[in-house]
Amino acid sequence: MSKEMIYAVEDEKHIQQLIKYNLETSGYKVLVFDNGESLLKECQNSVPDLFLLDIMLPGIDGFQICRMLRENPRTKSIPIIMLTAKGDEFDKVLGLELGADDYITKPFSTRELVARIKAMFRRLNVPAPESQEVITQGDITLDCTRREVYKSGELIELPYKEFELLKMLMQNKGKVLSRELLLEKIWGYDYYGETRTVDVHVRHLRQKIEDDGNNPVYIETVRGIGYRFNDKNPQ
């Protein structure tokens, strides 16, 4: 049985109980919180393996919590799944912009919730390939084994999905990868998201590895298809 720890923030008691019961039944350890303040306080003592954040909360909302977790060195690389209002694209996109790795729309089935979390942990536990352990292009170096990225020798902190996205692009540098392929390989077959998810993560990634995120030289957009990592040294 899995023993990963999950911190879930949800102010509705019946949803709290639903989440806790089903995740514990699936083998996870779960701490539930009524509000963001109590979660952030707990993170001063210990951190989980995954965060599950509702957006609509009293006090600090899910967006603010997500931003604060990504700014904290202790939690910036821990996966975040957000619970959003059904069909509210603004909530989904904003959550991804702030660094969330995935989102689930309400109302959700407990089966889908457990499947998403299992898929997230499966991808986290996949070992790096033996080949191409260290990939360098221009002033960007990606170490698959240590899961570290450097720009001009300086370590760049990337959330899980951004690291996986960069790794896949660099491992296939010079090749055009479609949004659908990136979504399938990084988010998985059991991810029900949209290709817009890929665009949001690419934009985030460009802001961190490019000298000018608005004029990228590494991650090129191939109109109507997807993205390609430049296999020529930028000038």
Image (cartoon, rainbow, N blue to C red):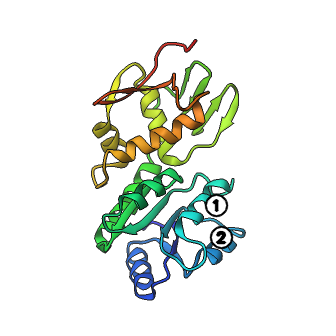
Residue kind at label 2, given as amino acid type? Leu
Dot 2: within a 10 Å radius of its alpha carbon, few (fewer than 14), some, or many (20 or more) residues? some
Residue 63: x %, y % from top left: 54, 63
Q: What is the number of the mark on residue 171?
A: none
206 to 14, vertically: above or below: above
222 to 22, vertically: above or below: above
Q: Of all residues shown, which one is farthest toward the bottom?
A: 13
Residue 131: x %, y % from top left: 46, 26
Q: Residue at x 61, y 27 (%)?
A: 211
Whether residue 217 is visible: yes
Q: What is the number of the mark on residue 40?
A: 2
- Of badges 2 and 1, nearer the viewer stands 1
Q: Give the distance between the C-alpha atoms of the residues marked 2 and 1, in whole angstroms.
A: 9 Å
Question: Which element carries disc 1, helix, strand or loop?
Answer: helix
Quadrant of the image containing the N terminus? bottom left
- Rendering quarter of residue 139: top right
Question: Which element carries disc 2, helix, strand or loop?
Answer: helix
Q: Of residues 118 and 40, which is closer to you in this image? A: 40
Q: What is the number of the mark on residue 68?
A: 1
Residue kind at label 1, given as amino acid type? Met
216 to 38, vertically: above or below: above
Q: Residue at x 28, y 39 (%)?
A: 180
188 to 166, vertically: above or below: below
Residue 74: x %, y % from top left: 68, 57
Q: Specify which label sits upstream in the sequence, 2 or 1.
A: 2
Q: Residue at x 47, y 57 (%)?
A: 95
Dot 1: within a 10 Å radius of its alpha carbon, few (fewer than 14), some, or many (20 or more) residues? some
Residue 173: x %, y % from top left: 43, 22
Quadrant of the image containing the C terminus? top right
Q: Of residues 37 and 137, which is closer to you in this image? A: 37
Q: Are marks 2 and 1 in contact (CB under 8 Å)?
A: yes
